[in-house]
Amino acid sequence: MNVLILCTGNSCRSQMAHGFLQSLDQNIRVCSAGIRPAEKVHPLAVEVMSEVGIDISQHTPSSVTAYLNDSWDYVITVCGNAQETCPVFTGQVGKRLHIGFDDPAAASGTAEYVKREFVRIRNEIQYQFARFYTMEIKGWQLRLDEEARNKDEENIR
């Protein structure tokens, strides 16, 4: 299973989604990338993820161009800009999905307010990607298992 998560800068939302999805299943190849990648992962994204036990401190933003020739079961955009400007993939793409979130890096105000926005978006990403994993990935695996059982039953007859 190969999943690519796209955002504009690959510094906040896509990195958090990458961390959550990978934490749910180490057997999935999860990558994240940006249309216009930032220089580094946002420090508050790293901080709020560490608060829930997920370390993304070694992640680095990368460009979507590095992944255009690969095959993906899912390409997921997490911001409107990435959805609108997503390039054409020359590799195979099974499904394209959009699971959008506000940009926590765009929050302005006190340090406490900005941190609360990062926490809010982190929690939304956690919920939506757990839902995606359960409905799409685990559901997909259950369908494959069922098809295999049906073939086995046909072969027995």
Image (cartoon, grey):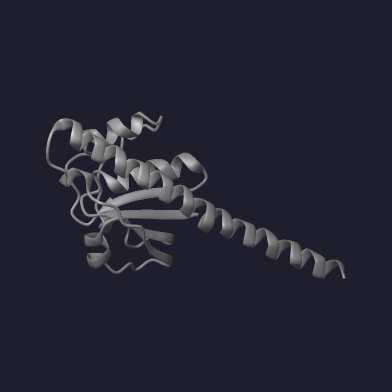
The residue depicted at 19 percent of the width and 36 percent of the height is 113
The residue depicted at 34 percent of the width and 68 percent of the height is 90
In the foreground, 22 or 49: 49
Quadrant of the drawing holding the C terminus: bottom right
Q: In the rendering, at what x and y percent does residue 79 appear?
A: 26, 57
Across the whole image, how many numbered discs are drawn on residues? 0
Q: In the rendering, at what x and y percent does residue 91 appear?
A: 38, 66
Q: In the rendering, at what x and y percent does residue 18 appear?
A: 37, 45
Whether residue 7 sits left or right of residue 18 in the image: it is: left
Q: In the rendering, at what x and y percent does residue 44 appear?
A: 23, 34
Whether residue 84 sits left or right of residue 126 in the image: it is: left
The residue depicted at 44 percent of the width and 45 percent of the height is 21
| Residue 57 visible in the snapshot | no
Residue 19 falls in image quadrant: top left
The residue depicted at 25 percent of the width and 45 percent of the height is 61
| Residue 145 visible in the snapshot | yes
Is residue 4 placed above or below 112 in the rendered structure? below
